[in-house]
Image (cartoon, rainbow, N blue to C red):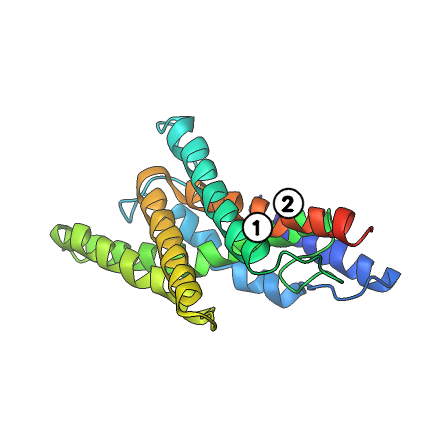
Amino acid sequence: MMLTVPVITILYGQALEVSGVQNLRIWNWINLLWLLPAVPLIYWQSAAGLPDCWPGNVPARQKLWIPLITGIIFGLLDVLVIKIILHPEPYQSLPPFLQPFPYSLFLFSSGALEIEIWYRLLPITLVLYLLRKTRKESWTPVAFMLLAVLTSLREPLEQWVSGPAWLTLYAFISGWSMNFLEAIRLQKAGFGAAWILRMGHYLVWHIALGIYVQWVELAR
């Protein structure tokens, strides 16, 4: 079930490419292979002391609404800073971080899944699982917090923003904070909640902004 959207993304992107749509970010079957490590990890969540992917005993407020609204807030902040303040003039073409709708919905849903698997699910699950298997469960709280802090550094460091000092600081703090909150959601409400938090951000920053640029700015 988890791999359904990535498969659609691959087939959809290839069809658009064949039809002549330009500047697409295309997924291929290698991208799908990168997601396969998540399949066994989903079944190890309880063994690692984490909630199931979509735990039935966790209220919707914790696993759906709080992460979704949190992600939307981060997305609105990015639109305010990067689009409204730094780039108020209309785009002349879709920039690389935007893609044509509705393809963008599938692409960024798959991208969010890939990031949550490799930035959080895989490192956190494996370490906590090994601690429990080696009877070092007392280390789990400290280990989780250390993992949450360190894994949250990866994305802002990989996507380091150059420019004015205030912009670099904003991008680093917001990137680290969102990743850290995703780790907390993983611990409290499962992998699905962490993915939804990122999707809340993507729905605004990548998808809604892309619709605006595509249908408003480029249509003028």
The circle on residue 48 is none
Q: How far apart, in angstroms, are the residues tagged by discs 2 and 1?
A: 6 Å
Residue drawn at (38%, 48%) of the image = 182
Q: Are marks 2 and 1 in contact (CB under 8 Å)?
A: yes
Q: Which residue lies furthest to the bottom in this view?
A: 162
Residue 28, image x, y percentages: 68, 65
Crowd around label 1: few <14 · some 14–19 · many ≥20 (10 Å) = many
- x then y, percent, for residue 47: 29, 47
- Mark 2 residue element: helix
Badge 2 is on which residue? Answer: 208
Q: Residue at x 63, y 56 (%)?
A: 88
Instruction: Judge whether 161 appears above or below 36 on screen.
Output: below
- Residue at 50%, 41% (x, y): give it: 72
Question: What residue is pinned by disc 1?
Answer: 205
Residue type at mark 2?
Answer: Ala
Front residue of 218 and 137: 218
Dot 2: few (<14), some (14–19), or many (≥20) neighbours within 10 Å? some
Residue beneath the point at 39% across and 51% down = 178
In which quadrant of the rendered view does residue 27 lie? bottom right
- Judge by depth and name the residue closer to the eye, 139 or 156: 156
Left or right side of 22 for 167: left
* Residue positioned most to the right: 19
